[in-house]
Image: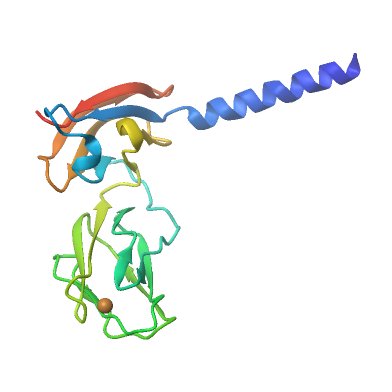
């Protein structure tokens, strides 16, 4: 009897914690309604919230890695929040020199040897095209979202924006080949699920 009471109390606690976390998540799906084209054909689609006046949300403290491996950027595409640093380890036995002309996030890491890592802080939202001054074939892309509320749509176009502050937001998409989209979304404390976004207006 005591044991079952205890496990009931434990289960109730777990359920409450889950609810608190999943509270204001925004879940949905992007749909590409173009004859003969699949979502996978257009490359990464980023879903993110625009910055709203009066809503402050610090960038994640994590430092994602973007490697140079076999004279290519791995991964080729990375989404971050503006304000985040990205570490760029050179995993090859040869020198690389990573740089970008994408203002205002332009940078030049200079030549660095095998096993070295250099970091770049991306302070501004926007698209950053990466190149290597030695290897013309090396190219990559970083998308810096203006808020930490972003996701790259996965299989089937599904996305989740976690722990969104309740209120009215602008939800946007970015893809290299498609026009940007923007919709207004009202997020209650209980979150949103099943939010559909057509990528072709
Ligand atoms: Cu290189």
Give the residue at x 82% y 22%: 6
- Determine the quadrant in which ligand 1 lies: bottom left
Residue 29 appears at what percent x and percent y?
A: 30, 28
Q: Nearer the viewer, residue 196 or 132?
A: 132
Residue at the farthest right position: 1
Q: Give above or below for 124 relative to 165.
A: below
Q: Work out which quarter of the rendered image holds the C terminus and state it.
A: top left
The reply to whether residue 171 is visible in this rendering is yes
Q: Which colouring convention does the figure follow?
A: rainbow
Q: Nearer the viewer, residue 123 or 40?
A: 40
Give the residue at x 83% y 17%: 5
Q: Give above or below for 72 relative to 197.
A: below
Residue 183 appears at what percent x and percent y?
A: 18, 29
Residue 139 appears at what percent x and percent y?
A: 21, 66
Q: Give above or below for 47 relative to 62.
A: above
Q: How many marks?
A: 0
Give the residue at x 25% y 45%: 44
The reply to whether residue 52 is visible in this rendering is no
- The image quadrant of residue 189 is top left
Give the residue at x 18% y 43%: 42
Q: Work out which quarter of the rendered image holds the N terminus and state it.
A: top right
- The image quadrant of residue 151 is top left
Q: Nearer the viewer, residue 78 or 16?
A: 78
Residue at the farthest front position: 36
Q: Give above or below for 80 relative to 90.
A: above
């Amino acid at each position: 009897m005591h044991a079952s009471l205890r496990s009931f109390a434990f289960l109730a606690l777990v359920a409450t914690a889950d609810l608190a976390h999943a509270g204001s998540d925004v879940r949905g799906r992007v749909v590409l309604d173009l004859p003969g084209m699949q979502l996978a054909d257009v490359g990464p689609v980023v879903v993110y919230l625009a910055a709203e006046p009066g809503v402050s949300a610090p960038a994640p403290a994590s430092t994602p890695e973007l490697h140079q491996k076999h004279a290519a950027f791995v991964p080729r595409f990375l989404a971050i929040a503006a304000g985040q640093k990205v570490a760029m380890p050179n995993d090859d036995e040869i020198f690389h020199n990573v740089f970008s002309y994408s203002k205002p996030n332009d940078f030049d890491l200079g030549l660095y040897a095998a096993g070295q890592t250099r970091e770049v802080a991306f302070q501004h939202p926007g698209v950053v095209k990466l190149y290597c001054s030695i290897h013309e074939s090396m190219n990559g892309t970083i998308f810096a979202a203006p808020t930490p509320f972003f996701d790259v749509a996965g299989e089937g176009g599904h996305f989740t924006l976690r722990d969104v502050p309740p209120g009215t937001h602008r939800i946007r998409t970015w893809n290299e080949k498609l026009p940007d989209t923007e919709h207004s979304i009202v997020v209650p404390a209980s979150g949103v699920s099943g939010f559909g976004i057509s990528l072709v207006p």
